[in-house]
Amino acid sequence: MTGEVHCIAHPLIQHKLSLMRRKETSTSNFRALLQEIAMLLGYEVTRDLPLENRTIETPLTTMEAPFLAGKKVVLISVLRAGSGLLDGMTKILPSARVGHVGMYRDHETLQPVEYYFRAPSDMADRQVIVVDPMLATGNSAAAAVTRVKQAGAGHVKFACLLAAPEGLEAFHAAHPDVSVFTAAIDERLNEKGYILPGLGDAGDRLFGTK
């Protein structure tokens, strides 16, 4: 199975992303927009969830109605900026199980350093969606997915707000089986490993830190 890249060009997503890119957008608006985009991305990431029919009663009659089948989805947030996407996705997947991977990027080597991991114990039979707003170098995303697979995850997807071509290449070199869902693929990385034109540091803008 080969991982694919799905760039979601829905007009609402693109409009909200443009608002997020503006440097004058406030922390509160940035946070709200990220949650809104996360909900919209969530619909696309979960498009292939299996359904099963169950008998229900409407006010008028009985019918066979579709419900989600199988075990609940697991959402894995890459700390700290992944929290913004997680908050939005849990609004449409309120019963999802949630895990966290703590990663920070060493600004000298641009390599990820893990400092925390906590996830549901039975991920083998569940669809796992790893969320992190920025797929820049791809190192942190790849390391997070590696850690999730080590914990037993079999069916993994990755959802982000922005991706760089270099990051996508590095990510799929490490995980060719994992599909990526993103709102935009930007031009390139700068010399510090930030996405251009991008939107700055997603974590700083989300939490109001500099």
Image (cartoon, grey):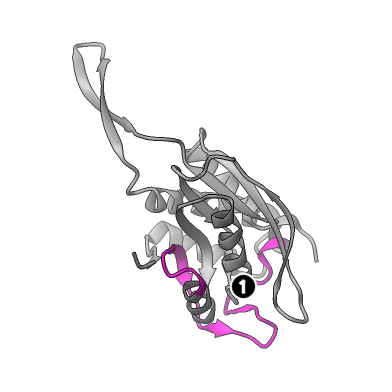
Compared to 49, does 109 lie above or below?
Answer: below
Q: Residue furthest right?
A: 210
**Nearer to us in this view, 99 or 120:** 120
Tally the numbered discs.
Answer: 1
Q: Quadrant of residue 195?
A: bottom right
Q: Is residue 122 left or right of residue 119?
A: left
Determine which residue is flagged by label 1: 139
| Magenta stretch: includes residue 192 | yes
Task: Residue 26 in the image: state x and y as whole percent.
Answer: 69, 59
Task: Residue 18 in the image: state x and y as whole percent.
Answer: 52, 67
User: SS for tag 1?
Assistant: helix
Q: Residue furthest bottom?
A: 191
**Image point 46% across, 52% down: which residue?**
154
Figure quadrant of the C terminus: bottom right
Compared to 76, does 4 lie above or below?
Answer: below
**Image point 57% across, 79% down: which residue?**
197
Structural crowding at the residue carrying mark 1, measured as other residues with C-alpha within 10 Å and reported as few (<14), some (14–19) or many (≥20): some
Question: Residue flagged by tag 1: what amino acid is it?
Answer: Asn
**Image point 47% across, 73% down: which residue?**
172
Q: Is residue 83 left or right of residue 37?
A: right
Compared to 184, does 47 lie above or below?
Answer: above
Figure quadrant of the N terminus: bottom left
| Magenta stretch: includes residue 154 | no
**Image point 41% across, 53% down: which residue?**
45
**Nearer to us in this view, 86 or 157:** 157
Q: Quadrant of residue 145?
A: bottom right
**Nearer to us in this view, 180 or 36:** 180
Task: Residue 49 in the image: state x and y as whole percent.
Answer: 35, 44
Q: Which residues are magenta?
A: 174-203
**Nearer to us in this view, 144 or 66:** 144
Task: Residue 109 in the image: state x and y as whole percent.
Answer: 74, 81
